[in-house]
């Protein structure tokens, strides 16, 4: 009996610690310097890959900043300072007054990790689901009896992309390419899973939030997504 | 589930960077390709919404039903069908109540200023698409039921892109224009949220996310509105010859292919003529004419 209780305790602890590790609920223990070094390391690492555009995006977002309304403490600080200096009372900020400040290091790192998750997990999910989504869209019309609609089922599931001649791009620069088949995608699944887990772990270690845009939807369609897969990307 | 071992953030980062090359899809390794994959995904979302709105969906090209979905991987023109055997595919959305619609990806549309813009996803009535194909025309933005401007993660989505979309929206007079992105900075979201009239946008449109559910809902609403609307110009068929060889005399057939404004002017002219005839005592009613349903009763 005691061994059973011990087993239960270990199981519950294991589950919670895993969630705690993945969901990023842990309190930040990294310093500002460490965050800065993480950000610059990630930026440099991405610059050497095909994902260098993510760094540009993160820097643009950082420079454009974030609008903030003055807090009650800010207003109180200004009033006290003016009172100390003997200046006359000033009017408070009006509704809708904001200041735009650049993103700080932790916000920049959080945004870059979100972008990276989209680039890896999002792209993988698109490739995995696209063919099935298209088949579903076509399949429902199978009840129709016209010849044209029966011929819909002639689609062989291939999705091909090519450069139109009128685009002015040399076709030799960008040859035709197609959506990867299921076997290729399955081979990539393990590494995608590892990357998303690592992203979640970095978030957890650095106490960074995950964007709300990446939360799995509660709509009916999302039942096809495995919540056990990190980020629910498959 | 395999969980990486606990380690310092810098060790985790090193491990992440080592795994990245294998995780990136070979097909989207060049930055431009990803954007077109995203357009294909949005094309799929539009088709799913069509199905949910009760439309039947078929893939077609210039030669008829398509067996391969062949999409543009760079901006192209709707009237150019592609080489034989390698035709560009579009989707045809049909419903019993209204004329069919077509959905295309990466085609140019002409704005009010007669300047060409790229529509990442374009939904327009089949009548208009056929007119473009027959006369080698680029579709007018005002003919479009829906245009989607898509931004994949490879495109920076900053204030510049947001302002660009607002400029595009003012020139392309489509009934519904949407800005869709995988992720965007706070400033773009604030820019769109602060616009009046309201700008339609969705951020985080990715499989299984709230953004996708929201886009599905918007496209469904667009299609439901199209289905139930009573617009004239878009539902007019080309003039039909009767057995007697005389053209069909209905006003709708006579003004086939003209704009809504043209039809409206024609209807007003006809009403003025009838009023004038009635005041002169020469109205059809004065001559003893009755509609068919009245005489049969």
Image (cartoon, coloured by chain):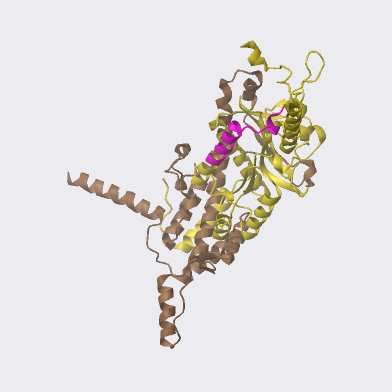
The foreground one among B147 and B206 is B147
Looking at the image, the residue that sits furthest to the left is A1
The foreground one among A38 and A163 is A163
Quarter of the figure that contains the C terminus of chain B:
top right
Q: Quadrant of residue B137?
A: top right
Please tell me whether residue B151 is drawn above or below residue A34 in the rendered image.
above
Residue B49, position as x, y percentages in the image:
56, 35
Viewer can see residue A119? yes
Looking at the image, the residue that sits furthest to the top is B296
**Image: magenta residue range:** B217-237
Residue A157, position as x, y percentages in the image:
62, 30
Q: Which chain is yellow?
A: B
Q: Quadrant of residue B129?
A: top right
Please tell me whether residue A157 is drawn above or below residue B170 in the rendered image.
above
Q: Is residue A28 left or right of residue B148?
A: left
Residue B269, position as x, y percentages in the image:
76, 33
Magenta span: predominant SS is helix
Q: Would residue B223 be counted in the magenta stretch?
A: yes
Q: Is residue A164 left or right of residue A96?
A: right
Quarter of the figure that contains the N terminus of chain B:
top left
Residue B48, position as x, y percentages in the image:
56, 34
- At horizontal 67% and vertical 46% (from top left) the residue drawn is B33
- At horizontal 40% and vertical 81% (from top left) the residue drawn is A80
Q: Would residue B33 be counted in the magenta stretch?
A: no
Please tell me whether residue A105 is drawn above or below residue B127 in the rendered image.
below
Q: Is residue A110 left or right of residue B260?
A: left
- At horizontal 53% and vertical 49% (from top left) the residue drawn is B204
Q: Colour of chain A?
A: brown
Q: How many marks?
A: 0
């Amino acid at each position: 009996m005691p061994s059973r209780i011990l087993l239960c305790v270990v199981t519950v602890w294991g589950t919670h610690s895993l969630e705690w590790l993945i969901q990023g609920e842990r309190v930040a223990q990294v310093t500002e310097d460490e965050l800065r070094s993480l950000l610059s390391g990630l930026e440099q690492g991405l610059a050497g890959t095909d994902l260098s555009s993510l760094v540009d995006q993160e820097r643009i977002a950082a420079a454009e900043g974030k609008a903030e309304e003055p807090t009650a403490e800010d207003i109180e600080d200004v009033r006290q300072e003016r009172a100390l200096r003997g200046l006359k009372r000033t009017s408070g900020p009006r509704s809708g007054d904001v200041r735009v400040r650049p993103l700080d290091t932790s916000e920049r790192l959080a945004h870059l990790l979100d972008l990276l998750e989209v680039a890896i997990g999002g792209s993988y999910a698109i490739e995995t689901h696209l063919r099935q989504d298209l088949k579903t869209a076509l399949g429902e019309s199978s009840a129709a009896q016209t010849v044209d609609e029966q011929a819909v089922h002639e689609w062989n599931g291939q999705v091909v992309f090519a450069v139109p001649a009128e685009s002015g791009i040399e076709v030799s620069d960008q040859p035709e390419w197609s959506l990867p088949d299921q076997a290729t995608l399955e081979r990539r699944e393990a590494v995608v899973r590892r990357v998303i887990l690592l992203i979640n772990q970095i978030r957890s270690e650095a106490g960074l939030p995950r964007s709300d845009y990446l939360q799995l939807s509660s709509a009916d369609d999302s039942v096809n997504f495995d919540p056990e897969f990190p980020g629910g990307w498959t | 589930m395999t969980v990486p071992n606990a380690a310092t953030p810098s060790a985790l980062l090193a491990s992440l960077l080592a795994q990245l090359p294998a995780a990136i899809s070979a097909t989207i390794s060049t930055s431009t390709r990803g954007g077109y994959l995203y357009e294909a995904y949005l094309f799929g979302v539009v088709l799913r919404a069509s199905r949910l709105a009760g439309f039947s969906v078929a893939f077609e090209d210039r030669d008829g039903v398509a067996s391969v979905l062949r999409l543009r991987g760079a901006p192209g023109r709707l009237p150019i069908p592609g080489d034989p055997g390698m035709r560009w595919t579009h989707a045809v959305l049909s419903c019993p109540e209204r004329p069919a619609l077509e959905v295309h990806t990466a085609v140019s549309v002409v704005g009010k200023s007669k300047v060409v813009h790229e529509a990442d996803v374009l939904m327009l009535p089949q009548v208009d698409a056929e007119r473009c194909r027959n006369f080698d025309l680029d579709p007018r933005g005002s003919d479009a039921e829906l245009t989607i401007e898509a931004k994949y993660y490879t495109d920076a989505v900053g204030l510049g892109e947001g302002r660009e979309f607002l400029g595009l929206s003012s020139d392309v007079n489509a009934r519904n224009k949407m800005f869709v992105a995988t992720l965007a900075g706070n400033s773009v979201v604030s820019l769109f949220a602060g616009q009046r009239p309201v700008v339609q946008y969705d951020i985080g449109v990715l499989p299984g996310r709230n953004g996708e559910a929201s886009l599905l809902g918007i496209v469904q609403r667009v299609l439901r509105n199209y289905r139930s609307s009573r617009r004239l110009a878009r539902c007019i068929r080309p003039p039909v010859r009767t057995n007697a060889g005389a053209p069909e005399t209905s006003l709708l057939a006579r003004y086939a292919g003209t704009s809504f404004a043209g039809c409206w002017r024609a209807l007003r002219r006809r009403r003025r003529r009838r009023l004038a005839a009635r005041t002169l005592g020469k109205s059809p009613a004065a001559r003893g004419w009755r509609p068919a349903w009245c005489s049969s009763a």
